[in-house]
Image (cartoon, helix red, strand yellow):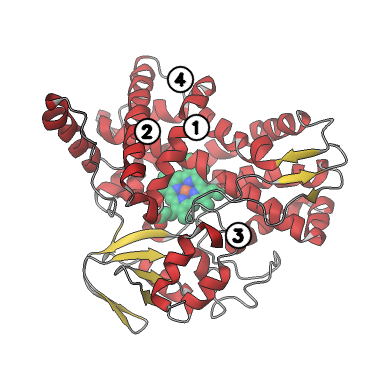
Amino acid sequence: MPDDALFAAVTDPANRADPYPLYARLRERPVARQRDGSYVVSGHAAIRALIFDPRLSSEDLPPFRRPPTGNPIRDWILNPIRSRIASAHRPLIFRDPPDHDALRAAVMREFTIPRVQALRPRVVREVDALLDACRGRERICLVDDLSYPLPVSVICDLLGVPESDEPQFQTWATQLATALEPDARGDVETRRHTVAAFDAISDYMRGLIREKRRCPTGDMLSGLAAPGPGGRKQMSDFDLIATAILLLVAGHETTVNLITNAMLTLLRHPEELARLRADPERAPRLIEEVLRFEPPVHFRTRKALGAITLAGETIPKGAPIILLFAAGNRDPARFDAPDRFDPDRPDLEHFGFGGGLHYCVGAPLARIEAEIALVALSRRLVAPRLMHDPPPYRPGASLRGPEQLHIGIDGIA
Ligand code: HEM
């Protein structure tokens, strides 16, 4: 396969179960031009340099455009206005400073460490209840039985979204997450579905925010909707809707992969599963190594605001850039024996949560949920074994994780 077609192969579902040999080839040129004019950055040092580089922009989403409906008022007046508003008020993950920083600061005022830490007992209870519900079974599907429902219920609670409404926005959340997949973004049909999901979830959030303003309930959404320091609005209503959607989608689509990837890795390394069972204190270092070795987010895209010369290559102004975090995580120039799963390695400077300006705001929450889930799984699943290896994967190449993970068990302790 030619070097300038390697990233197209990464996005091919046929390579989803094991993209790592492709990453190794890409790393031979840490900054590699692809046939479509994009540049894939796969070396640890090069990624590290770029995540702090102000010449990179995260404002790389194609503009919102709604398909024609046949109704002239809608097609020529209403929808173009709505599209312009949605393009100008993207969620902060797709924004640059100074707007990004102001939005992020407002989120951080609500997403505090004490608030997240206080969730621990609730997460323990939820994990126990989900595992109790599997009693009497000879196999579980980790995704359906625990990895998906746990973070969804926690993020609903944290934001103040009634969990009974959750089934409505499950499909919207999955659809909106395709905005992170560069190949899906270009597809007209996918974009039509994405815009429809955005409109539906925006209407839902608008109503909920109105409700929170009328009657605050002490959750994150009530906090973000309330006046900020100095009594002024913390952000415009359009930004507030986009922020709430981002947090909800992130809560739905990422931690599921961390818990599932972690359990898959442990079942492939039974000695590590046994060590965790004997010593739950190992959970944090184990999760960090999963974030390096099998991260839930493999890459993110950017745009070059100016020409950038790095690792012998010049990225021209305007070029799309792919920061291939998962390849940097396995760079032998940075990590000893990078393809070995080793929770005891001393150096864990991974890109599992990205880095720089856009470093994940949900990292403390994801870590707590994954640690509690893994400890409970190691202790309560009796004689767990993988039913399919590799398991079937979800479609995403960026948000990468198993669609299902069937585990045979002799019971729930
Ligand atoms: C295991 C779970 C998670 C992983 C692996 C993960 C990963 C990431 C990564 C790699 C980024 C950087 C994106 C970039 O550089 O463009 C990011 C950003 C972000 N994450 Fe997470 N995330 C996780 C969970 C969460 C959760 C639970 C939330 C919130 C509920 C969240 C909210 C966000 C937000 C708001 C950003 C954007 C930050 C910014 O642009 O400043 N994430 N996440």
Label 2, label 3: how many angstroms apart (C-alpha)? 28 Å
Q: Is mark 3 within 8 Å of ligand 1?
A: no
Q: Earlier in the sequence, mark 3 or mark 4?
A: 3
Determine contact: label 3, label 1, CB under 8 Å: no
Mark carried by residue 17: 3
Q: Nearer the viewer, mark 3 or mark 4?
A: 3
**Badge 4 is on which residue?**
217
Quadrant that contains the C terminus: top right
Q: Nearer the viewer, mark 1 or mark 4?
A: 1
**Badge 2 is on which residue?**
197
Q: Is 13 situated above or below 311?
A: above
Residue type marked 2: Ala
Outermost residue to the front: 70
Q: Secondary structure at mark 4?
A: loop
Label 1, label 4: how many angstroms apart (C-alpha)? 23 Å
How many neighbours does mark 2 have within 10 angstroms: few (below 14), some (14-19), or many (20 or more)?
some
Confirm whether residue 150 shows in the render.
Answer: yes
Q: Is 9 situated above or below 278?
A: below
Give the image location of residue 105, x and y in percent. Answer: 35, 44
Q: Residue at x 37, y 47 (%)?
A: 179
Q: Earlier in the sequence, mark 2 or mark 1?
A: 1
Residue type marked 3: Ala
Label 2, label 4: how many angstroms apart (C-alpha)? 26 Å
Q: Is 405 situated above or below 274?
A: above
Q: Secondary structure at mark 2?
A: helix
